[in-house]
């Protein structure tokens, strides 16, 4: 007993993130089942795998997915360092000065301008290699994407160059999470369909067409094409209430997404403060009764949003403990008056489940007037990530410590 406790990596930690690997695999299999047979799964691991930790996520899911997607060249390095040698899509612009690294990593860049395409072609020819490119087209989001003129010029260039090959054709929806009315998404899909047909008629063969993020894959099966780019859903979080409603309305069952991440900390001081006492910076909270306070060693520098001051609760002993006063850079205070008997270094759940209570990323996002994506993406990289695999019901599964 003593020995196993001593071996538990959590004993030494005051704040950590646990990943339920089975939930992650479950979610990926759910998307496998819900998408057409030929559709590949690309797991998006940008923003440190939505805060889950890029390295542990890549290692845990390499056998379940067909490709990984990142935003930056640095993230592409991290995916290769984690041991993935398969297809790797970079979705953001890579500084021209770092374009060599695309070749070294055998990554596949997303392109939306002729100037970058020319540059990569020259580079590939010099290195006697081929860069496999994804062309991202404008269909109505007006973010990254080649408009009709740029597209025509780029296709002409692809047709006559040997350094770059057109491997993929993509677009991204503007209004699919925020609404149950998919009229605009369907308009974008119509434009994409026309472009894909034109690309095929121009003689480009075996081009991987991909348009779908999580919400599109769940609510508009016709967006799945040859590959889906899955982010938030793979981590077990619904993109929005609207997506949940649209998915349920489709009624194909099998929509049991399981959250992968929980974030835990420990009580580092317990104290009673008298009726009338102020709590924290700015004196924003004044106790109306004698209050038992717990000090938590996390704050906004760890990704616990300051906007949650006086709004959120945490879970202590399976009960809700309201956050009192201002959330600080490294410290948060909560009211544990009604949380029963507690001890120093007792475990506290910031995000996740304890007893019968759950705090989801969706709820935390609502408290902070933001979206679950932002809550997850801003979880600090310095917090250690621990993997939980094959949990036995009613018992804690073994934890393997991962580097932060
Ligand atoms: C982030 C991103 C995705 C994944 O979106 P989710 O809603 O998290 O599934 C897909 N495609 C692109 C281009 C992205 O930037």
Image (cartoon, helix red, strand yellow):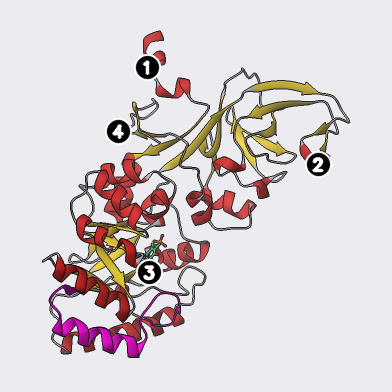
Please say whether residue 331 is visible from this viewpoint: yes
Between marks 4 and 3, how big is the CA–CA gap?
Answer: 30 Å
Question: Which quadrant is home to the C terminus?
Answer: top left
- Reading the image, the residue beneath label 3 is 216
- Reading the image, the residue beneath label 4 is 390
User: What stretch of residues is rendered in magenta?
Assistant: 138-167
The kind of secondary structure element at disc 3 is: helix
Ligand 1 quarter of the rendering: bottom left
Kindly indicate whether the residue at mark 4 contacts the one at mark 2 (C-beta within 8 angstroms).
no
- Counting residues from the start of the chain, the first of labels 2 and 4 encountered is 2
Foreground of the two, 400 or 348: 400
90 sits to left or right of 296: left
Mark 3 beta carbon near ligand 1 (under 8 Å): no
**Mark 1 Cα-neighbour bin, 10 Å: few <14, some 14–19, many ≥20:** few
Identify the mark at residue 7; answer none if there is no mark: 1
- Counting residues from the start of the chain, the first of labels 1 and 4 encountered is 1
306 sits to left or right of 58: right
**Mark 3 Cα-neighbour bin, 10 Å: few <14, some 14–19, many ≥20:** many
Between marks 1 and 4, how big is the CA–CA gap?
Answer: 18 Å
The kind of secondary structure element at disc 4 is: loop
Q: Nearer the viewer, mark 1 or mark 3?
A: 1
Mark 4 beta carbon near ligand 1 (under 8 Å): no
- Reading the image, the residue beneath label 2 is 282
The kind of secondary structure element at disc 2 is: helix
Kindly indicate whether the residue at mark 2 contacts the one at mark 1 (C-beta within 8 angstroms).
no
């Amino acid at each position: 007993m003593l020995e196993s406790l001593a071996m538990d990596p959590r004993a030494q930690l005051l704040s950590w993130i646990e990943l339920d690997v089975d939930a992650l695999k479950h979610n990926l299999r759910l998307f496998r089942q819900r998408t057409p047979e030929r559709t590949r799964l690309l797991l998006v691991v940008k923003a440190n795998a939505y805060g889950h930790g890029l390295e542990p996520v890549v290692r845990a899911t390499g056998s379940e997915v067909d490709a990984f997607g990142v935003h930056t060249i640095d993230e592409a390095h991290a995916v290769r360092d984690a041991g993935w040698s398969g297809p790797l899509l970079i979705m953001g612009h890579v500084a021209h000065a770092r374009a060599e690294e695309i070749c070294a990593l055998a990554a596949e860049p997303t392109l939306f301008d002729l100037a970058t395409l020319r540059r990569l072609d020259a580079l590939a020819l010099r290195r006697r290699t081929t860069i496999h490119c994804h062309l991202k087209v404008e269909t109505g989001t007006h973010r990254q994407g080649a408009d009709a003129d740029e597209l025509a010029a780029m296709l002409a260039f692809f047709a006559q160059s040997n350094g770059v090959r057109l491997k993929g054709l993509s677009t991204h929806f503007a209004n699919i999470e925020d609404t149950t009315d998919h009229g605009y998404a369907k308009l974008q899909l119509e434009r994409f369909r026309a472009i894909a047909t034109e690309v095929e008629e121009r003689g480009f063969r075996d081009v991987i067409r991909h348009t779908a993020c999580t919400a599109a894959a769940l609510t508009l099966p016709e967006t799945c094409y040859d590959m889906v780019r899955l982010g938030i859903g793979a981590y077990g979080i619904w993109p929005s209430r609207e997506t949940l409603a649209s998915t349920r309305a489709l009624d194909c069952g099998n929509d049991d997404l399981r959250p992968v991440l929980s974030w835990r900390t420990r009580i580092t001081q317990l104290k009673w403060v008298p009726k009338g006492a102020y709590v924290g910076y700015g004196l924003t909270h004044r106790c109306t009764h004698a209050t038992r306070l717990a000090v938590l060693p996390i704050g906004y520098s760890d990704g616990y949003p300051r906007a949650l001051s006086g709004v959120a609760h945490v879970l202590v002993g399976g009960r809700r403990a309201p956050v009192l006063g201002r959330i600080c850079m490294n410290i948060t205070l909560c009211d544990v008056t009604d949380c029963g008997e507690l001890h120093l270094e007792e475990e506290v759940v910031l995000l996740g489940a304890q007893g019968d209570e759950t705090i989801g990323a969706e709820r935390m996002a609502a408290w902070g007037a933001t979206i679950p994506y932002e809550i997850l993406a801003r979880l600090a990289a310095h917090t250690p990530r621990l993997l939980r695999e094959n949990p036995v019901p009613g018992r804690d599964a073994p934890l393997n410590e991962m580097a932060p």
